[in-house]
Amino acid sequence: MIHVDRVIVVEGKYDRIALARVTDALVLETGGFGIFTDDAKLESLRTLAREKGLILLTDSDRSGMAIRNYLIGAIGSEYIRNAYIPDCYGTEKRKKHPSAEGKLGVEGMSEEVLASILSVAQVPREDVVDPITNADLYNAGLLGGRDSAALRAEYQIALGLPSRMSPRKFLEIVNALRTREEFLRDMAERKM
């Protein structure tokens, strides 16, 4: 069981149940899109964010990213660490049909994957020594070039990250996953 000091925010109760097998953290649900109109729940999340900090762990589909972006804007990115599940296609055990995009959500991830995701999310960005920068991404062809989006998507897949991720979020997560030396080695090996 992984100890997490921050409050983890997920979309629904099945996500919360999946995380209860992995962590002792307080896990709260947004109620899906219900968070857009639930002022009391949003205010509670703001208070918890200021006091303990949040880890957002939403599905990697369009809806999950919309909820994540709303919370970042409503609460403030300085209180939030983002955790991302990889794009995995299939159907969750309790469902008869896959989601609209065909991706598994948080509830469909194995305990090992969830533990790994939470471990990465706990790495404070300010603790990263010699961080990877936008200039490094540019020099590697992952930012600002004609094929940069495709190259970045390829690297995201290699790292087990979802496809729906802004370059800014990509940089944040790469700094949590890789040292500068590891990143440069990855780029040299992939000949990017």
Image: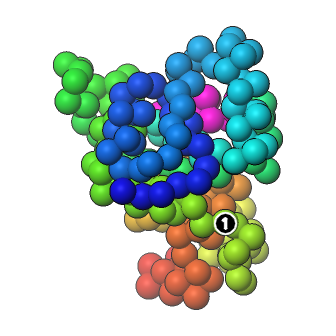
Q: Answer yes or no: is residue 9 visible.
A: yes
**Vertical relation: 137 (above or below) 169:** below
* Residue 89 percent across, percent down from the top left: 29, 40
Q: Which of 50 and 168 is in front in this view?
A: 50
* Identity of the residue furthest to the top in this view: 37
Left or right side of 127 for 159: left
Place residue 144 in its image quadrant. bottom right
* Secondary structure found at label 1: loop
> Magenta stretch containing residue 68, yes or no?
yes
Image point (25%, 36%), residue name: 90
* Residue 26 percent across, percent down from the top left: 53, 40
Amino acid carrying label 1: it is: Pro
**Vertical relation: 59 (above or below) 139:** above
Residue ID for mark 1: 124
> Magenta stretch containing residue 164, yes or no?
no
**Vertical relation: 152 (above or below) 56:** below
Left or right side of 165 for 157: left
**Vertical relation: 112 (above or below) 19:** below
Image point (48%, 62%), residue name: 119
Q: Magenta residues, as a range?
A: 61-71
Provide the major secondary structure of the magenta segment: helix
